Image (cartoon, rainbow, N blue to C red):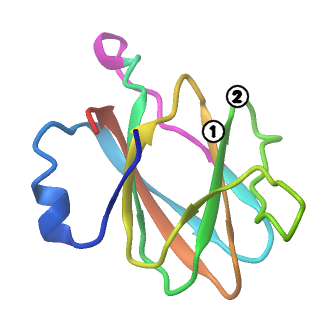
């Protein structure tokens, strides 16, 4: 299930999201970029949920994969693409499965995507 949270106050009300590890950032531009999720301690290595925040003023599209070849792209009319949209200033919590990389691309200009691994939604 996907929940889009619009304000920090709404994120604070996501009381069942438990952050594991440190936050990470991904600089997004008009070219897809990716970064590996941080390694987690063995006792929490299966934290498969993620909380994302688009700190930019443009849409960001993200994708998940198992290696650094993963790319994100924005769909166009009639053409599907490997990308989940995150609106500007929006938070998104969902299950990333066992992906080890995240990729992002900005619809235009640039944006920074912040994300946290954990448990919950």
Residue occupying the point 60% across, 31% down: 100
Q: Which residue is mark 2?
A: 66
Q: On screen, 31 above or below 4?
A: below
Q: Which residue is mark 1?
A: 101
Residue occupying the point 31% across, 34% down: 118
Q: Position of residue 82 (x, y in %)?
A: 76, 49
On the rendered structure, is 60 left or right of 7?
A: right
Q: Position of residue 49 (x, y in %)?
A: 39, 33
Label 1 SS? strand
Q: On screen, 70 above or below 20?
A: below
Q: Residues within 10 Å of mark 2 (few under 14, many from 20)?
A: few
Residue occupying the point 29% across, 11% down: 43
Q: On screen, 42 above or below 54?
A: above
- The residue range painted magenta reads 35-44
Q: Position of residue 19 (x, y in %)?
A: 24, 39
Residue occupying the point 15% across, 36% down: 16
Q: Position of residue 89 (x, y in %)?
A: 38, 77
């Amino acid at each position: 299930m996907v929940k889009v949270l619009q304000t920090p106050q709404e994120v604070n009300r996501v009381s069942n999201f438990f952050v594991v590890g440190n936050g990470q950032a991904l600089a997004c531009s008009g070219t897809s970029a990716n970064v590996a999720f941080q390694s987690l301690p063995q006792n929490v290595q299966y934290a498969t949920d993620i909380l994302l925040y688009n700190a930019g003023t443009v849409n960001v599209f993200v994708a998940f994969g198992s290696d650094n070849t993963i790319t994100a792209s924005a769909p166009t009319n009639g053409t599907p693409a490997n990308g989940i949209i995150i609106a500007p200033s929006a938070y998104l919590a969902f299950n990333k499965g066992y992906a080890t990389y995240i990729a992002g691309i900005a619809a235009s200009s640039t944006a920074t995507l912040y994300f946290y691994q954990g448990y919950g939604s």
